[in-house]
Amino acid sequence: MARPLRILQAMAGAAHGGAEEFFVRLCAALHRAGVQQHVVVRRNVARTAALQAAGLEPKELRFGGRIDLWTRRRFRAEIDAYRPDVVLTWMNRATEHCPPAASTKKRFVHAARLGGFYNLKYYAACDHLIANTQGILRYLKVKRWAADRVHYLPNFVSVPKAPARPRSEFATPEDVPLLLAAGRLHLNKAFDVLLQAMRELPDCHLWLAGTGPMEATLRRLAGELKIIDRVRFLGWQEDMASLFAAADVFVCPSRQEPLGNVVIEAWCARLPVVAAAAAGPLELIEDGRTGMLVPVDDAAALATGIRTVLESPEVQRRLSRAGRAAYEKEFTEEKVVEAYIKFFDAITGR
C-alpha cells in the first residue's frame, strides 16, 4: 500500500484577509479529511491559535523581506524534516521564500495558490499554479503558463446557522431595512460608493464590518453626507454568521474584487446580494437570479439595485434560494476538499 501523501502548506499573509481566512479553513478541512499536513506560517498569534484549535501544530517563521536569509534556511529545514510530496505556498511572499525542490533532501512538487492577478515573477520556480477564479485561470494562460500546469480550485465557505446579532448592540432600530457590507476598508472595496448610495436610501441603516486604512476617511465622508447616524462601523468581526442573520441585504460595492468570498458567504447564509460588477462578482453572480449586479463606481445604480431588492419580498426570496443553490453546487467544504485531494493525487501521479 502506498504511503499517504504528505502536504506542507505555507502562508505568510497579513493579519486579516480573505485568503488568510481561507488558508485556515482549508488546512482545518483537509485535516478533518485525514490529509497529512505540516503547516508553516508567518508569526501571528490569532492564526496560530486557530490552526491549533483545528488540531494542527503550525511552525512560525518570520517571513521578512528578500534579505531574510534566516527564514529561507528555516523553511528548507522544515521541508527536509517533514519530507513532503507537495509544498503548497500561498501568495507572493511564501512562494518567494520557498527553496528550490532540487536543493532539499527529497524532491517535492511545488504548487502555489493565487488569489489575484499577481506579478508572476515570484512563481517562476513553481510546477503548478492554483487559481481560485476562472478569471485568474485565464490570466495565467494568457501569461503563457501551460494548460496542464494551471488549475481552477475554488474557495469554500461555511457560515453556521446563528441567532441574529441584536440590533440594539449597534444602536440600530428594529424596524428599519438593514444593509450589511464587509471587507478591508480600502479604496478597492469602494465603501465610499456605498456611503454615497446610502444618501439615496434614507430609510436604510448600514453595518460595515472591517478595518483598514480608509476608516477615518469613510467616517469623515459619512459625516459630510449627513448619514453618520445611520452607519455603524463595526470593526473586524469574527462572528459574521450573526451579522448575516440580522441583515436584510448584503452589499458588495468593490471596484476591484478578484473573487468575492463575502458573496459566497452571503449565499451560504441565504442573504440576497447586490454587488458591483467587478471581476469576481461578475463571474459568480447570474444577474437577477443569484444576485443583483450594478455598474462599478455608480452610487445611483447601487442604490437602485438595493431598493429593488428591499421593495420586493418575492425578489428577496428568489435571490436567496438561487444564491444558496449556487453555493451548494460548487462552494461547499465537501466539494472543495475533494477537488484539492484529487489535485494532489494528480500532480504527484497517484
Image: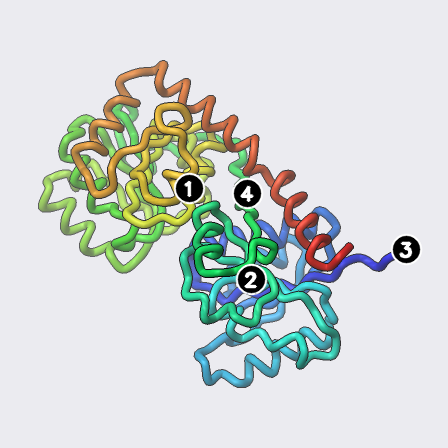
**Residue plotted at (48% across, 70% down):** 122
- Left or right of 336, for residue 208: left
Asked if the residues shown at circle 2 and circle 3 are in contact, with their CB atoms under 8 angstroms apart, the answer is no
**Residue plotted at (49% across, 51% down):** 137
Residue receiving disc 4:
156
**Is 156 drawn above or below residue 313 in the view shown?**
below
Q: At label 3, which amino acid type do we have?
A: Met
Q: Residue furthest top?
A: 314
**Element type at marker 2?**
strand
**Element type at marker 4?**
loop
The image shows residue 316 at horizontal and vertical percentages of 37, 20
Marks 2, 1: nearer the viewer: 2
Q: At label 1, which amino acid type do we have?
A: Val
**Residue plotted at (31% across, 57% down):** 212
Residue receiving disc 1:
262
Residue receiving disc 2:
112
Residue receiving disc 3:
1
